[in-house]
Image (cartoon, rainbow, N blue to C red):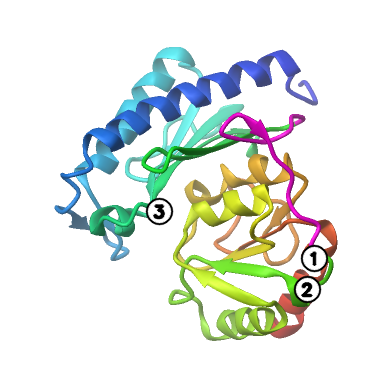
Amino acid sequence: MPTSVSPALMTEFLAFAHELANASGAILRENLHSRRGFDTKEDDSPVTDVDKNIEETLRTLIQHRYPDHGILGEEFDGKNLQAEFVWVIDPIDGTKAFITGIPIYGTLIALAWHGAPIVGIIDHPVTHDRWAGARGMRSTFNDMPIQSRACPALGEALMSCSNPEPFGPKEREAFDTLRASAKWCVYGSSCYAYGCVASGSIDIAIDCGRHREVDYCALVPVIEGAGGVITDWEGRALTIYSGNRLVASGSPERHREALRILETALV
């Protein structure tokens, strides 16, 4: 078994991920005024016909180009999940924002190799913002190379959290401790905030609760390719088998501090 994916194949996969993002973005832009209707899933999260349309479209494109690859999506059952390569799709990350007309929602597209994310796209077609990353390459924002910020001290760190409501009591205590150690925190930006970690305008992003692999796999190559770090709350690398806790930092130093605070608070 090869120990790495060749640069040529990585370039090919990244180019295809951009094609998928172009397809999903076209659907989102075409349906800006049809976002009001939605159903509620068993986990109480909303889903729209647009979510399903995007995922079905991307699944078809993937199956046509790479029939041996697996697919793990938000809205439909996984396919061939034991494959060497598995595409991971969240058709609309931020469906509540999409439904209510707040333009902080996007599509997350990742490719995992033996469970580890190696290609990632964070695409926000309404705001025309796209982050892209692949293992061994510098991450980009709208095709320009980016670098995360080496924040000089945790007390100067700008922090983000999508939504602290799903946190359990101990997790909320850990989050509150970390938040009190940072300068201040913004809320509600979903995957956009993790793109901002890669770009250097946010120093620490943290989430927990309802997050799953479709929510974080695409973030990994983007943040790591910009010089940042993203793990679970115990410092373990994120894979398609990880849990629902994630934290990202613009620098290894701040990440180690964040993990120490979380570990102490969770004891």
Asked if the magenta segment contains residue 130, the reply would be no
Q: Which mark is residue 154?
A: 2
Q: In the rendered image, which quarter is residue 107 located in?
A: top left
Pointer 3: residues within 10 angstroms few (<14), some, or many (20+)? many
Q: Position of residue 178 (x, y in %)?
A: 68, 79
**Label 3's element?**
loop
Q: Which mark is residue 104?
A: 3
Three-letter residue code for mark 2? Leu
- Bounds of the magenta segment: 136-151
- Prevailing SS of the magenta stretch: loop
Q: Position of residue 11 (x, y in %)?
A: 65, 18
Three-letter residue code for mark 3? Ile
Task: Give the mark, 2 or 1, whose residue is nearer the N terminus.
Answer: 2
Q: Which mark is residue 254?
A: 1
Three-letter residue code for mark 1? Arg
| Residues under numbered marks 3 and 2 in contact, where contact means CB atoms less than 8 Å apart | no
